């Protein structure tokens, strides 16, 4: 009888474990960008490598003063546990929010407490943006699994070869002060891209976005390094990106002269030139305060 009871308990525990495991979601369901879909905007960009989490948080994300780094951990059974480190413009710590996030019926429910006076509690139900990534002439990979990729666009015709590039001046020897700020490029209007680079203690962090209200057009900027006249960093693609493989880091090598950042941005599988383009800046972070992405009146 005792043996039978033990067997029944063991079977029940195994069934419970199997049920719990069936509801656990892997990192591909959590990684990348999430935003609130009502009330005040809150945007989270999670970079998940094993059980380690980094990334960025912002509210009005074209306003560089709202950008804050994320650091934490991931577990399939319990989800995300992380801090949001609110920094002064000099990179010193102002406050830290403590938060957790779990998937509930396709939404990521972020709960936590503010690190400022009073430590107010907050809860942000967030979604994957239904607009998805911007369509392209090449394939776009999208997460979480089961998400529909954007349609392919027809390549433009009749475009001639661009003239050879001539730098505006010799590339300058760089320090962090030459890099910090907001750099603009890749078009104009709503879809132009912001590369926002800020100090974090003695290091740098940032985000690229454009348009800056759809997390499927975001990438955290990590792994900054300055060596003489060369700046390098990674644009981290977690839940969307050109090609067929996710996640990946697009490595950027850049030089700066006369307010132009000339960059070559390559996927890890590329051997030739990647995306070669220029950004203009830097605009002071505080000069972007008050930027709000909004559709123009019709």
Image (cartoon, rainbow, N blue to C red):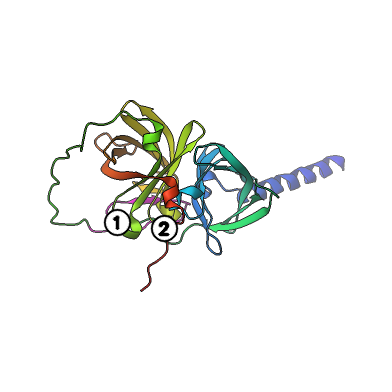
Between 208 and 229, the one lying in front of the other is 229
Question: Residue 55 appears at what percent x and percent y?
Answer: 50, 42
Question: Mark 2: which secondary structure?
Answer: loop
User: Which residue is drawn at the image coordinates 65% and 49% (left, top)?
Assistant: 114
Which of the two discs, 2 and 1, sits closer to the camera? Answer: 1
Question: Is 107 left or right of 169, judged from the image as shown?
Answer: right
**Label 2 or label 1, whichever comes before in sequence order:** 2
| Secondary structure mostly seen in the magenta stretch | loop
Residue 257: x percent and y percent?
A: 27, 36
In the image, which residues are magenta? 136-154
Q: Residue furthest bottom?
A: 298
Q: Quadrant of the C terminus?
A: bottom left
Q: Which residue is mark 1?
A: 188
* Mark 1 surroundings within 10 Å by alpha-carbon count, few (fewer than 14), some (14 through 19), many (20 or more): few
Residue occupied by mark 2: 132
Is residue 75 visible from the viewing direction of this image?
no
Indicate the quadrant containing the N terminus: top left, top right, bottom left or bottom right.
top right
Q: Within 10 Å of the Cα at label 2, are there few (<14), some (14-19), or many (20+) other Cα atoms?
A: some
Pointer 2 with pointer 1, Cβ within 8 A: no
In the rendered image, the vertical position of residue 168 relative to residue 145, given as above or below: above
Inter-mark Cα distance, 2 to 1: 20 Å
- Kindly identify the residue that appears in the image at 38 percent across and 71 percent down: 297
Name the residue at 27% across, 54% down.
137
- Residue 188 magenta: no
Q: Which quadrant of the figure has residue 38?
A: bottom right
């Amino acid at each position: 009888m005792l043996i039978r009871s033990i067997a029944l308990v063991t079977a029940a525990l195994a069934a419970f474990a199997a049920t719990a495991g069936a509801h656990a979601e892997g990192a591909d369901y959590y990684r990348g960008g999430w935003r609130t879909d009502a009330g005040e905007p809150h945007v989270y960009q999670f970079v998940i490598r094993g059980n380690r989490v980094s990334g960025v948080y912002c509210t009005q994300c074209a306003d560089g003063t709202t950008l804050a780094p994320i650091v934490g951990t991931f577990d399939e059974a319990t989800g995300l546990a992380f801090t949001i480190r609110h920094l002064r413009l000099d990179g010193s710590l102002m406050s830290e929010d403590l938060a957790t996030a779990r998937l509930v019926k396709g939404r990521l429910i972020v709960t936590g407490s503010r690190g400022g006076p009073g430590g107010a509690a907050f809860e942000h139900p967030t979604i994957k943006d239904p607009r998805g990534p911007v369509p392209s002439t090449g394939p776009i990979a999208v997460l979480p699994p089961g998400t529909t990729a954007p349609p392919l666009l027809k390549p433009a015709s009749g475009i001639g070869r661009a003239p050879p590039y001539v730098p505006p001046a010799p590339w300058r020897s760089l320090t962090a002060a030459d890099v910090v700020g907001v750099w603009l490029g890749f078009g104009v209007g709503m879809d132009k891209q912001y590369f926002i680079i800020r100090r974090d203690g003695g290091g740098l962090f940032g985000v690229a976005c454009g348009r800056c209200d759809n997390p499927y057009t975001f990438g955290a900027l990590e792994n900054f390094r300055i060596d003489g006249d060369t700046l390098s960093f990674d644009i981290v693609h977690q839940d969307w990106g050109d090609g067929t493989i996710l996640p990946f880091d697009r490595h950027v090598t850049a030089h700066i002269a006369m307010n132009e950042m000339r960059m070559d941005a390559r996927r890890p599988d590329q051997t030739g030139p990647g995306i070669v383009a220029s950004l203009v800046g830097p605009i002071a972070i505080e000069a972007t305060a008050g930027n709000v992405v909004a559709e123009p009146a019709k």
